[in-house]
């Protein structure tokens, strides 16, 4: 396929992020603390600061019945759904349509008092991966979002502080075939979701405020997003 300017970065980061996501919490070494739990959803964070700024890596694992990894990644990647589920989003623009699986976004997020408002420019890439652990299992789907530069939107010139993030959503579909060989329905599928993110707030914000925001917003985001996908897909044919 014709390579575009971001392809080498994207390919390297996707492979790295997928490898990291597939590692369980255990073998990521210690340091991960469980900070939120709700049914099948478990959220972990590591407390890390860079230059006094909170950049706590986050790793969430969730198992959701009735949806597939392709569907989760489709509704996460596609800009036309984002305002429906991304509650802290104030404005979103697609700066570039690099290819049908790679977009560049500019987003401004609602201001979180007393921090100043944030914006972010990132490429977003969706990819299907062969399931090399279970050959005849369904494919794995992933979306990786990673900050990038935009000459037309230089950092920190307007009212917003530019943040820097790397996000990886990795989805493994599980099919529990019905005994009597009946066709597979939504009752026979579930999706194991791993969501990893590192958000550098880009400029000073009180650690206590940021940690409170992360503790409140991340569980809300994953619950709201997965409920959205369930609702959007319930009367539609399965997308594998
Ligand atoms: O997964 S994505 O790529 C989905 C596309 O939208 C993504 C997720 C999260 C963010 C994000 C951007 C800014 C901020 C803060 C940092 C300082 C002040 C604003 C936050 C804080 C963590 C809280 C937050 C957590 C979850 C969801 C939304 N908000 C998160 C951006 C993109």
Image: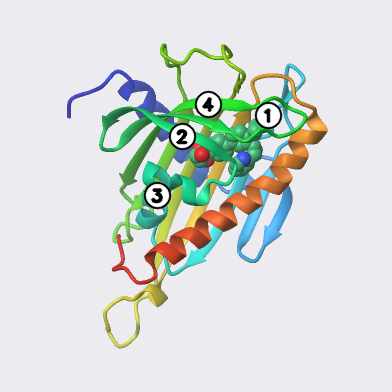
Q: CA distance from mark 1 to mark 2?
A: 23 Å
Identify residue for label 2: 92
- Which residue is identified by label 4? 120
Q: CA distance from mark 4 to mark 3?
A: 20 Å
- Tell me the element at label 1: loop
Q: Residue 184 — which label?
A: none
Mark 4 CB within 8 Å of ligand 1: yes
Quarter of the image where the C terminus is located: bottom left
Q: CA distance from mark 3 to mark 1?
A: 25 Å
Secondary element at tag 3: helix
Question: Is residue 16 shown above or below 173?
Answer: above
N-terminal label among 1 and 4:
1
| Residue lying furthest bottom | 180
Disc 2 crowd, CA 10 A, few/some/many (<14, 14-19, 20+): some
Marked residue nearer the N-terminal end (4 or 3):
3
Asked if the residue under mark 3 is in contact with the one under mark 4, i.e. CB atoms within 8 Å, the reply is no
Earlier sequence position, callout 2 versus callout 4: 2
Q: Viewer-nearest of labels 2 and 3?
A: 2
User: Residue 36 versus residue 112: which sits nearer the camera?
Assistant: 112
Q: Residue at x 36, y 50 (%)?
A: 74
Nearer to us: label 4 or label 3: 4
Label 2 and label 3: CA atoms lie apart by: 18 Å
Residue 211 image position (x, y, % from top left)? 76, 38
From the viewer's perspective, tell me whether residue 29 is left or right of residue 130: right
From the image, tell me which residue sits under label 3.
73
Nearer to us in this view, 123 or 113: 113
- The disc, 3 or 1, on the residue closer to the chain's N-terminal end is 1
Q: Quadrant of residue 117?
A: top right
Is label 2 or label 4 in front?
A: 2
* Lateral position of residue 65 relative to residue 100, left or right: right
Question: Which residue bears the numbered disc 1?
Answer: 55
């Amino acid at each position: 396929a014709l390579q575009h300017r971001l392809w080498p970065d994207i390919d390297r980061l996707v492979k790295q992020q997928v490898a990291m996501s597939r590692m369980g919490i255990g073998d990521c070494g210690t340091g991960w603390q469980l900070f939120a739990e709700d049914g099948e959803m478990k959220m972990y964070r590591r407390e890390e600061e860079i230059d006094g700024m909170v950049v706590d890596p986050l790793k969430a694992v969730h198992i959701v019945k009735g949806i597939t990894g392709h569907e989760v990644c489709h509704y996460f990647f596609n800009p036309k759904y984002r305002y429906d589920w991304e509650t802290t989003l104030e404005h979103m623009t697609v700066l570039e349509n690099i290819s049908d699986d790679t977009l560049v976004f500019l987003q401004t997020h609602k201001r979180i008092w007393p921090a100043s408002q944030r914006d972010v420019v990132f490429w977003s890439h969706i990819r299907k991966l062969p399931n090399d652990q279970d050959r005849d299992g369904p494919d794995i789907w992933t979306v990786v979002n990673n900050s990038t530069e935009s000459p037309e939107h230089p950092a920190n010139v307007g009212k917003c502080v530019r943040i820097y993030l790397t996000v990886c959503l990795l989805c493994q579909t599980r099919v529990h075939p019905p005994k009597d060989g009946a066709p597979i329905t939504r009752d026979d599928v579930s999706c194991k979701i791993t969501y990893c993110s590192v958000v550098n707030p880009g400029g000073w914000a009180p650690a206590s405020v940021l940690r409170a925001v992360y503790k409140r917003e991340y569980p809300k985001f994953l619950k709201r997003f997965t409920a959205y996908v369930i609702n959007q897909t319930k009367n539609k044919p399965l997308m594998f």
